[in-house]
Image (cartoon, helix red, strand yellow):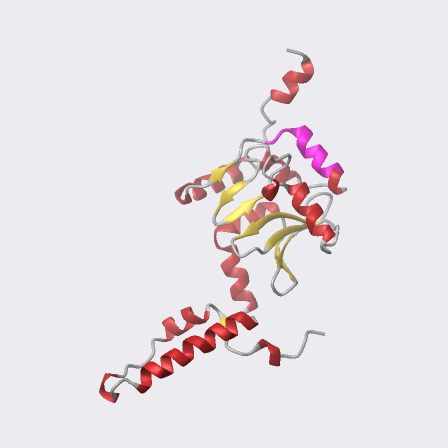
Amino acid sequence: MSDEGATADAAPAPSPHDELFAAFEEAAREGDPEWNPPADGAALDAAERALGVRLPAAYKAFLQRHNGGLVFDTTLYGVGCEDEGSDLVVLNERGREEGLPAHLVGFAATLTGDVYCFNTDEGEGDDHPVSLIDIEEGQVIPACENFAEWLERLPVLEQQLAEARGPQPMTVEEWEEFLRRERAKLRKLSQTPARELRMPDPEQVRADLGGKIPVDPRHLKPRS
């Protein structure tokens, strides 16, 4: 085997983040994560050239353990993936065609389609902060100081960000579905004897609303 081949097949050098990675893997184990095989350095270099950015060192070290995968209901992108639906370069190039600013580099997606990005315009060197792009609202929401913090907080991060933002207006579709449910409840109530009526459960009401404000969004003023 040539020296070049030996280098390509060699295990990645120890990372200062190995302890963090091991703790994250242990926490994720109960959720039965799906990991991809490790990325090699050449694929990482090619991804940086293609996107014209420097990726965080911690993120690159993590991909050399797991080249993306599914964990905590979040899809982590990899580099040089056969599946274009989880490839860092392919997904960001598509995003840029649809208006994603070049300084925002998506590296993971939630079940609802929101995207975690590195903000490459900020941070020291290649240690970029992480933001969440709310696809539905078109908002960029600051999330974490860096990738290391993102890993530590990922199990509860989406819930924390939602709580920090507070209830959001319903979409038109959600509003119409809300009206349908409320009309059905009123019909049922009108046919129920008074002695059988029960006070609504506040927790169930909140669950039914899904954290949304019950208001027709067509009546809201557009954001300035």
Q: Position of residue 192 (x, y in %)?
A: 27, 84
Look at the image and tell me in which quarter the C terminus lies.
Answer: bottom right
Q: In the rendered structure, does residue 152 fall within the stretch colored magenta?
A: no
Over which residues does the magenta segment extend?
39-49
**Residue 201 left/right relative to 36:** left
Q: Position of residue 40 (x, y in %)?
A: 63, 29
Q: Nearer the viewer, residue 48 or 89?
A: 89
Q: Nearer the viewer, residue 156 or 38?
A: 38
Decide whether the magenta segment is chiefly helix, strand or loop.
Answer: helix
The residue positioned farthest toward the bottom in the image shown: 194
* Image quadrant in which you'd find residue 220: bottom right
Q: Position of residue 111 (x, y in %)?
A: 51, 53
The residue positioned farthest toward the left in the image shown: 195
When the figure is inspected, residue 65 is found, relative to residue 218, above or below; the finding is above
Q: Position of residue 20 (x, y in %)?
A: 53, 40
Q: Is residue 161 visible?
A: yes
Q: Residue at position x 52%, y 51% from top?
A: 153
Q: Residue at position x 72%, y 49% from top?
A: 120
Q: Residue at position x 56%, y 72% from top?
A: 172
When the figure is inspected, residue 76 is found, relative to residue 177, above or below; the finding is above
Q: Nearer the viewer, residue 132 or 58?
A: 132
Look at the image and tell me in which quarter the N terminus lies.
Answer: top right
When the figure is inspected, residue 64 is found, relative to residue 142, above or below; the finding is above
Q: Residue at position x 42%, y 72% from top?
A: 206
Q: Is residue 169 visible?
A: no
* Image quadrant in which you'd find residue 100: bottom right
Q: How many marks?
A: 0
